[in-house]
Image (cartoon, rainbow, N blue to C red):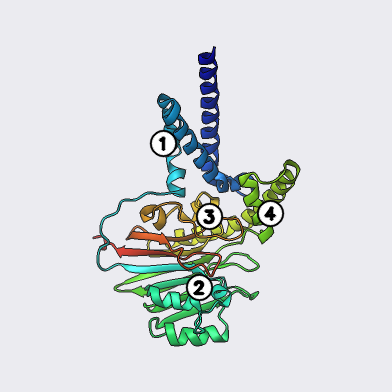
Amino acid sequence: MFKGFKEFTYKMVAGANVATIIIMLLVGFSDFFQPEKFAALANLGLLFPVFLIVNLGFLLFWLLFRSKYAIIPFLGFLICFVPVRKYMPINFSGETPKGCIKVLSYNTWNFGAQTEDAEGTNICIAYLQEQDADIVCLQEACPTSRNIEQIDSMLKPMYAYQDTTMHVNGGNCLMLLSKYPILSKERIPYESKGNMSVAYRLKVKDREVLLINNHLETTGLSLEDRRQFKNLVIGKLQVDTAEETSKLLVVKLAEATKKRAPEAEAVAKYIQQHKEQSIILCGDFNDGPISYAHRTIAKDLTDCYIASGNGPGISYHHGGFFVRIDNIMCSDDWKPYECKVDDKIAVSDHYPIICKLKMRPKKQK
């Protein structure tokens, strides 16, 4: 009798495992949902790590108690290989070659909310000086007069070419620090009350490169909303509160996703119009790796983190949300190496993302 009960339990657990994989598959490919029509479903990608962990739990369970059933979660990971790799890539790259350029993208939260060290030096600016990247794309980087003084004294000797673009409504700035000449710039046209994308033409060594710096529509969630989201995911809310909170979050996230979709489409259209050019794209998408915005923009580019990074690479770490929303991408004439999210500086709500790019030889016509 006990043996029969045990077998029944195993079958029930196996059924739950299969159900988890089906949901994980739906969530993993939710970036194909068009936000204008399926706004709520388009945000399911935020839940992907939950099902990833649950399926991993099933794998451990089967290995401990009934190893032959371990094939179920293993097949689940195999079926969901594409979203698993998007969310948590694993790469075994060789030695980084000489001649790479170093690219850094960082939402500074207005220079770390002006956080300074004991000597009065802005920590963000000191960090940028220490990193010595060749190209730096900053978001939420509206400098104060004190910031400008320190940028001039600490960063201008390194970066002869600089640009700051403020949104027409004020309050949001994109900044470029470059060791390479800036030939021109233009805004990528799309409607937004405070977000924008700027395209620059740079002369990088012997090649003209199109650099795109992005800051797409914010989630619209307050710090309290994000804290409630965290509690919802880990099951700390009571049933009635959880239902009310989940409805509120779905509505807010859906609205933000609907606004972000045409922005991502405008950037993708711009990339398509310039697809014959060498392209490096950076920025804060305010959306995870499994999202419509990410899939749309990355369609004709290589996501440098997926190609050369390791692990989930959490770049946003504030108020209960932990997700990679900052990106570096490139056209196929570049090969990425050592892409990483640097969590050693925590004065902003984002961590910077850094990558080394090696220019491939020009194709013979």
Vertical position of residue 128 compared to residue 291: above or below = below
Is any atom of residue 10 visible in this view?
yes
Q: Which mark is residue 323?
A: 3
* Place of residue 196 in the rendered image (x, y in percent of width and height, measured from the top left): 57, 68
Give the mark nearest the N terminus, 1 or 2.
1
* Place of residue 335 in the rendered image (x, y in percent of width and height, measured from the top left): 32, 59
Alpha carbon distance from label 3 to label 4: 17 Å
Q: Residues within 10 Å of mark 4 (few under 14, many from 20)?
A: some
Q: Which mark is residue 186?
A: 2
Q: Which residue is mark 4?
A: 252
Judging depth in this view, the residue of 239 and 340 nearest the camera is 239
Q: Amino acid at mark 4?
A: Lys
Alpha carbon distance from label 3 to label 2: 30 Å
Give the mark nearest the N terminus, 4 or 2.
2
Badges 3 and 4: C-beta atoms under 8 Å apart? no
Vertical position of residue 97 compared to residue 163: above or below = above
* Place of residue 331 in the rendered image (x, y in percent of width and height, measured from the top left): 38, 59
Vertical position of residue 149 compared to residue 95: above or below = below
Q: Which element carries disc 2, helix, strand or loop?
A: strand
Q: Which element carries disc 4, helix, strand or loop?
A: helix
- Image quadrant assignment for residue 64: top left
Q: Which residue is mark 1?
A: 78
For marks 3 and 4, give the one nearer the viewer. 3
Badges 3 and 2: C-beta atoms under 8 Å apart? no
Q: Amino acid at mark 2?
A: Glu
Q: Is residue 259 left or right of residue 360?
A: right
Alpha carbon distance from label 4 to label 2: 31 Å
Q: Amino acid at mark 3?
A: Val
Q: Which element carries disc 1, helix, strand or loop?
A: helix
Give the mark nearest the N terminus, 4 or 1.
1
Alpha carbon distance from label 1 to label 3: 23 Å
